[in-house]
Image: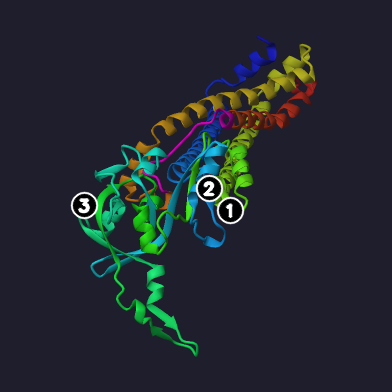
Amino acid sequence: MPTELFLAGRYLKPRRSAVSLITVLSILGVTLGVAVLIVVLAVMTGFTDLMKEKLIETQAHFQVRPDYGGVLYNPEMAVEAVKKAGGEAAPVIESPVIVQIDRFLDPRVVMFGTSPEELLKHKIFTADTLKEGKLALGRGEVIISRDMAQRWRIRLGDKILLHTQQRLTKLVDFKPGGGVELNKQASAYLPAEFTVSGIYSVGKYDFDRTFLFVGIDDAAELLGFPWGSATALYCWGPDPFNQQKLVDDVRAALKHLRVITWEESNRQLLGVLAVEKNMMFFLLIFIVLVAAFSIMNTLITSVYQKTREIGILKALGASDGCVTRIFVLQGFLIGVVGSITGTLAGMLVIFYRNDIMNFTSETLHVELFPKQFYFFDGLPAHIVATDVLIIVGASVVLCTLGALLPAFCASRLDPAKALRYE
């Protein structure tokens, strides 16, 4: 073992004194900083990955839509163009609706018109998604979420009424001179009645709270569209994360229509998540920086406590560089030990994260991870090896840099002065 490394290791294990306590606290500071960074970045990465997974599960890889919110009266032509480019497509009808149960109205709902075959084929629904009833969308049947069933206090077989803006706006006309009047042709307006045939739960809170499913022909009739029309094409490719060529080919074939990828639809959300992760790393690295200052304080104390030893070393022929390396290696070793223990502690916290979160919530009577805000039932986490290497590397570098000043002070000691009173 090199002399400098041997002495650096011995200096980290002094007899019981204030220096040894400060050394332990310095290592604990690095451990805490590394553990917190690993946990936070793993949670942020897991949150982003799970968000992307849920977005891809509940959305198309890309959508084909007419300009200005129009209607595709002949969607089959566009479906063939997508298939020719190497993708799959399904015509759908999306529209906001107002749900009525007795005298209660809920306007926060989006009607999704499609077929059960398309839901299963493109994995919007899976075998575990349907919680009650059957996956069927016959005439006058609707599939709602478990959240809706609880919110509206209804069960399988119950009836709901759907109002659309197309029908409601036809009830009145604007007078040329101002004011409104009843449209006599629409005076016999009745909402559409549907029977609940199934109850689903995807596990993404905003999706479960918003979407109900009806047959595409029922949706067209409710909105006054001709049968066979659609408001959009939902399209899927082999790889949602590498589909630029497919999207470009579809755009070239359907120049009169808009093609929107899932990343473009959720650009703001994904951008916010990326910025939050970077800001978390920038802010929390200051914990490690504080630990580096603690290491500097420890080593400065060590230099003055070991003045005699340093003097003897230099009197025996140790160079300034040798003394410098001893104390720099001390900082390096503290960084390495603290990073290792911090990494292990961080991974342990991540493994038991949901148990810790549930215990804390029950103890403090505070919901730490409300699903109505974060869309998920549990706390996600994903450890990325690159993130861990960056955190460990930054910690070791900061701790080593923190040792430079005391190392410089030690190298400048005059052996004659250091041993004058010995």
Q: Counting other residues with Cα less than 10 Å from the Cα at mark 1, is it few (<14), some (14-19), or many (20 or more)?
A: some
Name the quarter where the N terminus is drawn: top right
Range drawn in magenta: 375-388
Do callouts 1 and 3 mark residues in contact (Cβ within 8 Å)? no
Residue behind mark 3: 156
Secondary structure mainly formed by the magenta segment: loop
Is residue 343 shown above or below 67?
above
The answer to whether residue 185 is visible is yes
In this view of the protein, which residue sits in the foreground, 128 or 214?
A: 214
Amino acid under label 2?
A: Ala
Q: Which comes sooner in the sequence, label 1 or label 3?
A: 3
**Amino acid at dot 1:** Leu
Q: Are marks 2 and 1 in contact (CB under 8 Å)?
A: yes
Residue 421 visible in rendering: no
Q: Residues within 10 Å of mark 3 (few under 14, many from 20)?
A: some
The tag on residue 78 is 2
Residue 387 is inside the magenta segment: yes
